Image (tube, rainbow, N blue to C red):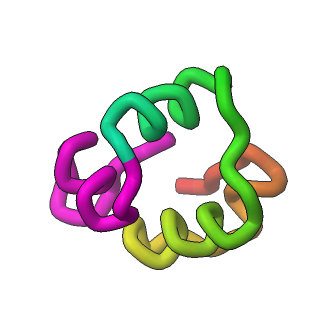
Amino acid sequence: MIKKREKATQIELSKELNITNQALSQYELGKRIPDAEMIIRIAVFLMFPLIIFWTGQMKG
């Protein structure tokens, strides 16, 4: 997972998403899969198109 928005830290992102830092770390490491609602919340915070999360590909 890339923290694009103002180079957000893991702690900032986890606070914004109202999840633990450990849960976010598990998402980033692929040890836990976020549900669709969480994926949308992450995409909105990071200002990424949702398609990135389903294809795993980024351009540019």
Residues 52 and 16: in front is 16
Asked whether, in this view, residue 2 is left or right of residue 6, the answer is right
- Label count reads 0
Relative to 13, say whether 36 is above or below.
below
What residue do we see at 60% from left, 64% from top?
Answer: 38
34 to 23, vertically: above or below: below
In the image shown, does 10 or 49 lie closer to the viewer? 10
Identity of the residue drawn at 52% across and 72% down: 41
Return the x and y of residue 25 as percentages of the image width and height: 43, 29
Query: Residue 18 location, x and y as percent?
Result: 35, 62
Q: Is residue 59 above or below residue 43?
A: above
Q: Hey, which residue is sitting farthest right in the picture?
A: 55
Q: Quadrant of residue 36?
A: bottom right
Q: Which residues are magenta?
A: 1-19
Q: Based on the picture, tell me whether residue 30 belongs to the magenta stretch.
A: no
Magenta stretch: includes residue 17: yes
Q: Image check: 23 left or right of 59? A: left
Quarter-of-image position of residue 33: top right
Residue 50 rendering spot, x and y as whole percentages: 68, 71
Residue 58 position within the rendered picture, expressed as x and y whole percent measured from the top left: 63, 51
Q: Residue at x 34, y 49 (%)?
A: 3
- Position of residue 3 relative to residue 24, above or below, is below
